[in-house]
Amino acid sequence: MQILTAAADYDAATAVNSLWLLVAAALVLLMTPGVAFFYGGMVKAKSVISMMMMSFGAMGLVGVLWVVYGYGMAFGTPIIPGVLGNPFDGMIGLSSLLGIGDGGAMSPDLAGLAFVGFQATFAIITVALISGAIADRAKFGAWLIFAGVWVTVVYFPVAFWVFNLKEGWLASVLKVNDFAGGTAVHINAGAAGLALALVLGKRVGFQKGIQKPHNVPLTLLGASLLWFGWFGFNAGSEAAVDGVAAIAWINTLAAPAAAILGWLIVEKIKDGKPTSIGAASGAVAGLVAITPACNILTPGWAMLLGLLTGAVCALAIELKFKLGFDDSLDVVGIHLVGGIIGTLYIGIFGAGIGLLDTGSFAQLGVQAVGAFSVLIYSFVLAYIIGWIIQKTIGFRITSEDEIAGVDTVVHGEEGYLLDARA
């Protein structure tokens, strides 16, 4: 592979916009360690390494796959119109690695490569989010196999549908408004998490109240890193330093702030005490909901969305006990439910396209088709992939190993060395 090093003349706007996109990409990449901390604090002390390794494993595997062929599948020339891009296409990937197409030359396109890097971080965190649904009971090797197959057959195509604004069927044909990934990231991950929770089954002794977070400060640190990185997630999706990026930034502050209040109000009414885990979960729920809508809501409507989502998600996390599926860390209750609320909310309150402005339910219908298309596609394929892994090499650890602790059994490590002699 050759890298063409001839100097390129970039105008000031391109340089500034690309710089912001590179910074935003770094912020979004930080969100995956944030997920690791957020999830890690909520599991058992003897599962914390396993939980965090699932996020770090996603960073390693998905980062490589994105460079090799993921970008081409999501943004390359369509090989299936509206549905899938060519893995051999694009400024990175197989064409460059194999020296084909343009001879393997790689041009240092500032704006283009900044976008490639930015979108890579979305793929990574989407996979990491799924892991919370199967905490305390999954084999690491099986998880990596699932992650590699799922990101290839589900995430990369869905990213083409949603983020490829010129070619994707949801973005260009149906005109779904999903600015930063309510469908492609959160509904996608939530549906896959639900599928895996069903495939792996319940943890030993699963019932309401059986497990408390082992390290609340760790979870609060994770939520803080997530919120910090989310400003890059949402405002960076404009790929420019302009007014849309600014309104996305403000809404990324307003919605989760209101969602914290919504969640805590429900906790106080329902359980008598507002909790720090509730505040952290409420913030994440609000961030999820505002993700697809941050470009098209006024801050007032964004705060209403956050308040509503925080309250609804605080109630939705109880569904696993009523319906009998073990979604360990509420991926379904927060990401799937929050993603659906945020995506559909645009159809009513979205500026210029929602029901309030147009008097038409058309956009609401469009948003619903987008949300449930991704939900069904992700759930079905995740279930099939997980079921095949479980029936062949085994996805879930044994009950004995689960009781003994995933960290020592799978990784040979302990999260906390409590021996005073050490």
Image (cartoon, rainbow, N blue to C red):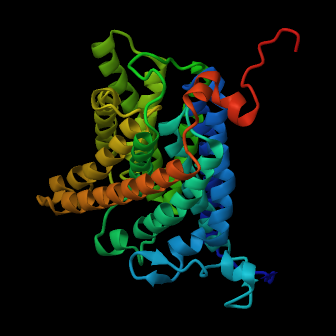
Q: Is residue 296 above or below residue 31?
A: below
Of residues 404 and 319, the one drawn nearer to the viewer in this rendering: 404
Figure quadrant of the N terminus:
bottom right
Q: Is residue 14 above or below residue 368?
A: below
Task: Where is residue 399? Give x, y as percent.
Answer: 55, 28
Q: Is residue 401 above or below residue 116?
A: above
Q: Is residue 29 visible?
A: no
Residue found at the far left of this picture? 359
Task: Where is residue 380? Give x, y as percent.
Answer: 37, 56
Task: Where is residue 306? Give x, y as percent.
Answer: 34, 36
Q: Is residue 344 visible?
A: yes
Q: Residue at x 40, y 47 (%)?
A: 195
Left or right? Give the position of 32 relative to 326.
right
Residue found at the far right of this picture? 421
Q: Residue at x 28, y 15 (%)?
A: 270
Task: Where is residue 170? Give x, y as percent.
Answer: 34, 68
Q: Quadrant of residue 299?
A: top left
Residue found at the far front of this picture? 392
Q: Quadrant of residue 43?
A: top right
Left or right? Give the position of 194 relative to 353.
right
Q: Residue at x 40, y 82 (%)?
A: 81
Q: Quadrant of residue 419?
A: top right
Q: Is residue 238 above or below residue 13?
A: above
